[in-house]
Structure formats: structure tokens, C-alpha cells
């Protein structure tokens, strides 16, 4: 086969172009820190990267969901803590008023304080997180307890507000209002009315102690169940944190370059490119004119 000068030149240019392409690839990897910068660089790595990135995005969303769950649970627990303190104070007042040495005016004064504490409990029951009522099930736009004059109505919405904290795992973050507030306000209103009634005796007032204790026990039981859920959420959060670390490592192993290796490859490619340029110069330099001189 006859080899011409143009064939040698074209072949040299082709190899030089490939060498420039390799230099460009290594420089791009160093500047971006990624093995590939377009799917055509390595379709397999690109496809795996899409899967790993989707998994990491899911994990990051779960972490944001944990913040929302803690917001509900911690605000619920704080509200019940204040409600328990208010009921404990009401119980103390009932014990005082149950003493037959108390006059009707003294019991009326106690009645006024209990009415104020009742309104305080209504405020606690209508606790909002952002723009959502946390004690009215899924109907978060309406207050669970509505007070109109002396009339108090309590929501019966028992639907759970669930948040996905792991793949396919939903945890209820709200409290059933009927378990806590059912009968509470009607009992307190009856208590206040009897305190205002001069015909009621200390024995009549003491009968409310059982009801108050029952409501306090409901609150304590609900807080215990709420605490158990918070413990589970904390354990799940630890697991999600581990999954995030693993997902980031897998994604990094798939996409990120080994800087030391790329720098070495770049240096080798630079040496090869310089050698190719030197050889090309020697190939192109001799021409027929050079021999006719």
C-alpha cells in the first residue's frame, strides 16, 4: 500500500485531536470533580447516578418531615404540660372550696378563678402550629374547642394526621381530642356553677375531685403515649441519618473522581501529547523542496 505525505499528516492530526480530547476530559473532571459531565460520557454511570440521586432526595425529604413531626409532637407535649398545671391548680381550689368553713363569697371568688382557668384551657386546646390547629384531627383549619358566651363545644374529629418518616412508614403526630377534652369543659362549667350556688355544700364540691383526677389522669396517659411516639421518631431519625450518609457515599463513589488518579492521568497525557507533537513536527517537516535544495 502506498503511503503518502497527506496520509501521514491526516493520521497525525487525527491522533493529535484524540490527545486534545483526552486532555480536555481530564481538565473537565478536575474542574468539576465528577467522572462524567454528560450522559454520553458513560451511560451506565449516568443511569446509576439517577437512581442514587433519587434515593438521596427521598432521604432528604424524610429529614424535612422529621422537623414537621417534632413540631407537632413537642408543641402537643408543651400544651399538655400547661394543661396539667392548670388542672392541678383547679384541684387545689376544689379542695379549698370543699371546706364547709368557706363562705359563699369565698366560693364565688374561687369560681371566678376556675372560670379564668377554664378559658386558659380552651386557649391551650386551640393551640396552633403555624396556621394549623394541632388538636382537631385532620381539620386543622378549625379550632377544636369553640366558646360562645357560656357555651363550649368540643370537636369529635378523631382522624389521625400522619407524616411519612421512612419509606412506606407513616407516624401519627396528633392527639385524639376526644381522649383529652371530652367532658372536661362541661365538668368545669358545672363546677363553677355549683361554686356560685350558695345552697351547695362542701360535700357537693368535693364530688368534683373524682372528675378532676380523671381528667388529669387522661392528660398524663396521653402524654406518656406521646412520649413513646417521640422516642420512636428519634430512633427512626437516627436510622434516616445513617441512610443519608450511606446514600451520599454511594453517590460519591459513583460520580466523584479520584483526584490523585486524574492528576496522574493528566500528567501522563500531557507527556504523550508533547511526544506526539514532536513526532508530528518531524513527519511534516521534510518535503520535496527540502531535497531539491
Image (cartoon, helix red, strand yellow):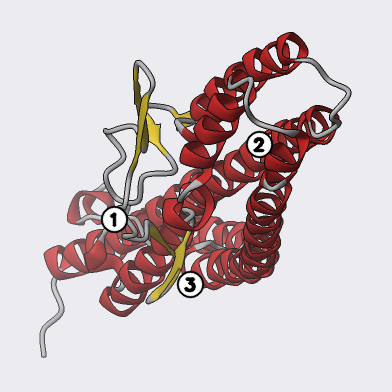
User: Could you tell which of marks 1 and 2 lies nearer the N-terminus?
Assistant: 2
- Indicate which disc, 3 or 1, sits on the residue closer to the N terminus: 3
Where does residue 196 sit, x and y in percent of width and height? Answer: 59, 19
| Residue under label 1 | 284
Q: Mark 3 vs mark 2: give the one in front.
A: 2
In the image, 56: left or right of 238?
left
Q: Are marks 3 and 1 in contact (CB under 8 Å)?
A: no
Along the line of sight, the residue nearer the viewer: 273 or 119: 119
- Numbered circles on residues, count: 3
Task: List the residue tagged with mark 3.
Answer: 254
Q: Residues within 10 Å of mark 1 (few under 14, many from 20)?
A: few
Q: Which label belongs to residue 83?
A: 2
3D distance between C-alphas at marks 1 and 2 = 93 Å
Q: Can residue 186 be seen in this snapshot?
A: yes
Which of disc 2 and disc 3 is earlier in sequence?
A: 2
How packed mark 2 is, by other alpha carbons closer than 10 Å (few <14, some 14-19, many 20 or more), is many
| Residue 282 in sight | no
Name the residue located 51 percent from the left edge and 24 percent from the top edge: 123
Do the CB atoms of the residues marked 3 and 2 lie less than 8 Å apart? Answer: no
Q: Residue at x 34, y 59 (%)?
A: 158
Amino acid at each position: 500500500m502506498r503511503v503518502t505525505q497527506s496520509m501521514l499528516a491526516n493520521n497525525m492530526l487525527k491522533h493529535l485531536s484524540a490527545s486534545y480530547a483526552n486532555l480536555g476530559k481530564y481538565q473537565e473532571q478536575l474542574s468539576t470533580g465528577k467522572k462524567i459531565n454528560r450522559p454520553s460520557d458513560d451511560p451506565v454511570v449516568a443511569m446509576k447516578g439517577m437512581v442514587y440521586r433519587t434515593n438521596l432526595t427521598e432521604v432528604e425529604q424524610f429529614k424535612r418531615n422529621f422537623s414537621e413531626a417534632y413540631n407537632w409532637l413537642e408543641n402537643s407535649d408543651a400544651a399538655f404540660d400547661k394543661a396539667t398545671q392548670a388542672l392541678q391548680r383547679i384541684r387545689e381550689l376544689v379542695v379549698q372550696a370543699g371546706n364547709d368553713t368557706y363562705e359563699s363569697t369565698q366560693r364565688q371568688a374561687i369560681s371566678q378563678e376556675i372560670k379564668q382557668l377554664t378559658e386558659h384551657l380552651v386557649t391551650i386546646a386551640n393551640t396552633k402550629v403555624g396556621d394549623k390547629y394541632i388538636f382537631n384531627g385532620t381539620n386543622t383549619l378549625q379550632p377544636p374547642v369553640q366558646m360562645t358566651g357560656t357555651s363550649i363545644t368540643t370537636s369529635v374529629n378523631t382522624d389521625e394526621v400522619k407524616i411519612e418518616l421512612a419509606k412506606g412508614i407513616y407516624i401519627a403526630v396528633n392527639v385524639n381530642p376526644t381522649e383529652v377534652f371530652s367532658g372536661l369543659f362541661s365538668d368545669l362549667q358545672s363546677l363553677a356553677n355549683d361554686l356560685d350556688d350558695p345552697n351547695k355544700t362542701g360535700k357537693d364540691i368535693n364530688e368534683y375531685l373524682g372528675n378532676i383526677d380523671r381528667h388529669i389522669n387522661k392528660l398524663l396517659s396521653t402524654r406518656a403515649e406521646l412520649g413513646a411516639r417521640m422516642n420512636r421518631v428519634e430512633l427512626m431519625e437516627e436510622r434516616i441519618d445513617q441512610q443519608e450518609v450511606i446514600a451520599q457515599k454511594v453517590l460519591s463513589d459513583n460520580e466523584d473522581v479520584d483526584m490523585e488518579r486524574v492528576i496522574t492521568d493528566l500528567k501522563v497525557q500531557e507527556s504523550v501529547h508533547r511526544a506526539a507533537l514532536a513526532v508530528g513536527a518531524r513527519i511534516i517537516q521534510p518535503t520535496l523542496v527540502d531535497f531539491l535544495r
